[in-house]
Image: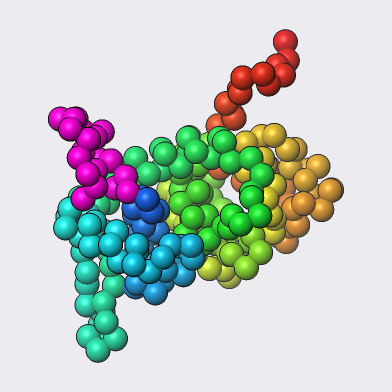
Amino acid sequence: MARGYGQFCGVARALEIVGERWGLLVVRDLLVGPRRFSELRRGLPKIPTNVLSTRLRELEAAGVVRRRLLARPETGFEYELTEYGHDLEEAVMAFGRWGARSLGEPGQDEIVTADSLVMALRSTFRPQAARGFRGSFELRMGDVVVHARIDRERLDVATGALAGAELVIETGPILPALMAGEVDPAAAVNGGDVRLTGDARLLDRFVELFQIGSAPTRPGAATIG
């Protein structure tokens, strides 16, 4: 566990458990599903191996993560969240929604991973906008592919392609701006920033269903009105 803050406070205790560098990103990826050490390492390519080992030991000691033997014990084990760890889902998604408002353009050394994209869709999904809607999407960002199936207010998101997806969306760094309503979907398609396969009319529905809140106004920024 991280060094204590000397505060008898739930926020302080939470930071002591998951606030160390990379800790919450490990939890983020495990919220998508159990992962072997090598899979976690692949999803967090900049994390040093020794740091990942340390974070996993700390999270295990705190009761957030546990190890589970694979079906064939000789193939090793994988890490999964405990019930206590899964209780972080709402907080992680709220944190993701808050952070997404300040994403801007990706840096040269910043990447998108399948697990991070799955959590982005889960955190930005608006159930109230999905009432009465059934549909499926496949989202491609370079080599990263995820899919989403929606049955009214129920969302199922996972990594990988989806056979028979009603709309396949191929895009890049413009995705956050599209989901924030800063870019018109038709303009994004006409400009070549978004490529569609399937029912193109569903793109408008996609940006209604998955929305990032407006970006914060920064000191000195121009305002309208």
Q: For residue 142, which quarter of the picture?
A: bottom right
Query: In the rendering, at what x and y percent does residue 82 appear?
Result: 21, 57
| Residue situated furthest right in the rendering | 190
User: For residue 3: magenta?
Assistant: yes
Rendered position, 112 above or below 153: below
Most distant residue in the top direction: 225
Visible residue check, residue 207: no
Query: In the image, which residues are magenta?
Result: 1-20
Q: What's the residue at 48%, 62% (across, down)?
A: 46
The colour scheme of the drawn protein is rainbow
Instruction: State whether residue 22 is above or below residue 79.
Output: above
Q: Is residue 211 above or below residue 86?
A: above
Residue located at (29% from left, 59% from top) = 55
Q: Quadrant of the C terminus?
A: top right
When asked about the image quadrant of residue 208, the answer is top right
> Looking at the image, which is closer to me, 52 or 162?
52
What residue is drawn where x is 22% and y is 69%? 67
Q: Does the magenta stretch include residue 131?
A: no
Which residue sits at x=29%, y=72%?
A: 78
Left or right: residue 177 compared with residue 88: right
